Image: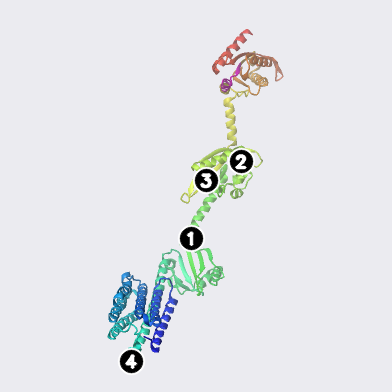
Amino acid sequence: MIMSFASLAEVFVIIIANIVLLGTMLALSSGRRDGVLFWAMGFFWHAVTYVILLLWPSAWTELGLLAATLTYALGLTFLALGLGRFLAQKISGWVLWLPCALILVTAPFINEWPLARVVLRGTILAAQTGYLLYFLLRHRHSAPGGGKYYLVVGFAILVLFQIFRTVYAAVMGGAGWPLLSLDISQFLGQIEPAKLISLSLVITLPSLIGISSLFIIKDRLRQDVEDMRLFMQKVLDAIPHQICVIDRSGAITGVNRAWNRFAIENDGHPDSVGPGANYLRVTLAADEALGRGIEEVLDHRRDHLSTEYPCHTPKRQRWFLLQATPLDDSRGRAVISHTDITAQKELERLQLHSLTMFRDVANLVPGILYKARERSKDEGRPVFEFMSPRISDLGLEAQAVCENADLLLSRVHPDDLHPMVDSVQRCSAARSAWHMQLRLRQRDGSYRWYQGRATPEQENNGTEIVWYGYFQDIDELKSHEERIRVLAHHDALTGLPNRILFNDRLVQSMALARRDQHKMAVLFIDLDRFKPVNDRYGHDMGDALLREVAERLRGCLREVDTPARIGGDEFVILLHRVTDEEDARTVADKAAAAMAAPFLINDTILTISSSIGISVFPDHGESANELLIHADREMYRRKSGN
């Protein structure tokens, strides 16, 4: 069977019409899986159908008709998918692909019977088209606009046409395919009106369906734009800030609910500050510099404008943050927002007031107050956010220390620096209070003692640690403590260790002697003829004599030995290491000679003597008390001998 020239022209016209529709759909497609793209695929397979009929060899007519029928059914399937997308409704998968499956399954059984083939395949295609019409009618309310009605008419005619072509092919005895008779010379060549109607419908129906889809797309886009506008308006209305959109001339084109509410609250009317009102003109009249800034935003000479301004009313004082941002569109519009920052301004005022008060108090406090914020190990040392002016006592400026914390560390005594850093790190890890006594270098280069204290506080939901602390000058206190310590362990008159300190050193010396297996000794000294001096010349002369005795005893001893006054005119000496009692006797003789030499006090020559008892550890006792008792007895024995 060879196609006539008329048939070839018919097929070419159909193919060209479908290609035009295909290109139109692809041009309108906005995504990889939207309805327009599916419809474009439908017209593509429709065009493929007629390409197959045009190019398939005559010897393969049955196989060519099968392929053409499948591609036509596939085109209807993609039209169904696109329709589902347009209507936002889901089509069952078995309904979509069942026609193609039936055509394939039945092909081996009906290829030998042209009449059965024509009737069955024509019925399948008519049913598939009819389902599209049913689906559209069922969900017609999901499609906006009037394009759906054109689509209903197109599908209805397509169903009727499919039925007509099926009946026509059956009447022909199955000699032709339900959509196009390959044997034109047998029938179409004789009935020109039928051929004309067939060609017109085959071209017109897809065009009608395609045009209807364009109407649906246009209505859908219009609906989407309206839905997006309503959605954006709801979003803007939910924002508590006052927002408006102005055009190139400065006229307001849209506002949110907060904008209107603010106008009403300030005795204004929404119409006077709503759409149509010229925002730029009002702003220029109120603040020319601000208005010029908005003009620069509208002219795209400025990317952003942000400024704070007061808006005080008789009822209250208010502050706002104005921001203007250009919209990237051809209409030269800009978004204006007004954010109420009154609470923030009040908080800043209170913070400034608190900081000022804190600084005033810090100036009155006799110490160095500070606030330090911890930083991570990678960021380095803590940062001082506040330092009281009393830091000037160390020769430093408060601002300089806030900028460089190492300046404060440079004032710490070298012996106290590492202990201080270690203690701070331990307290930081444990989140516990820090306290330490340390020495800080003063402006004149001298060092004074300070008591450092700090307490950690959590900020920003526990993510940051801030330390509040102070350094208090305790140099006078340390001096008093040292004096108290000296008085507690030394004789106030002579400056020699007292009985408490002497006993402590005696116990330590015995422990060392016991450990190192050596000897040590104790000398017990009592002054002879001291009482007559005290009675004759008075207590002041006696006290002066005791001080001179203490100095002479110091001169008789090594640095490691300890002289002590334990009461009245009684003295003791601790010799830390001796070979035997003879070594101790040598020191005792030296001390006795020193005591026997005349004393010149206040132009008066005084003469005294001494009695000295000796005890050696461990020969004369294993305890401090035993050694003292033995030395005391020896002293009295010698005094009696004298």
Q: Where does the image place residue 78, in percent across and percent down from the top left? A: 37, 74
Disc 2 marks which amino acid?
Val
Marks 3/1 in contact by CB < 8 Å: the verdict is: no
* 158 and 70: which is toward the camera: 70
Tag 4: amino acid: Gln
x, y (%) of residue 172? Answer: 29, 86
| Mark 3–mark 2 distance (CA, rounded to whole Å) | 19 Å
- Residue at the disc numbered 3: 467
Task: Please state the horizontal and vertical placement of residue 398, each as a whole percent of the image.
Answer: 60, 48
Single out the mark in the foreground, 3 or 1: 3
| Tag 2–tag 1 contact (CB < 8 Å) | no
Marks counted in the figure total: 4
Does 518 lie within the magenta span?
A: yes
| Residue at which label 4 appears | 190
* Circle 2 SS class: loop
Toward the viewer: 184 or 539? 184
* Tag nearer the camera, 3 or 4: 4
Label 2 vs 4, first from the N-terminus: 4
Task: First in sequence, mark 3 or 2: give its number.
Answer: 2
Would you call the spot at circle 4 few (<14 residues within 10 Å), some (14-19), or many (20 or more)?
few
Q: Residue at the location (40% across, 69% down)?
A: 231
Residue holding disc 2: 412
Q: Separation of disc 2 and disc 4 at Cα?
A: 118 Å
Q: Quadrant of the N terminus?
A: bottom left
Nearer to us of marks 2 and 1 is: 2
Is residue 473 among the parts visible in the rendering? no
Inspect the image, locate mark 3, and give the three-letter code of the amino acid beneath it: Trp
Magenta stretch, residue numbers: 508-523
Q: Is mark 4 on a helix, strand or loop?
A: loop
| Type of the residue with mark 1 | Ile
Q: Is residue 212 magenta?
A: no
* Spot occupied by residue 216 in the image (x, y as percentages of width and height): 38, 77
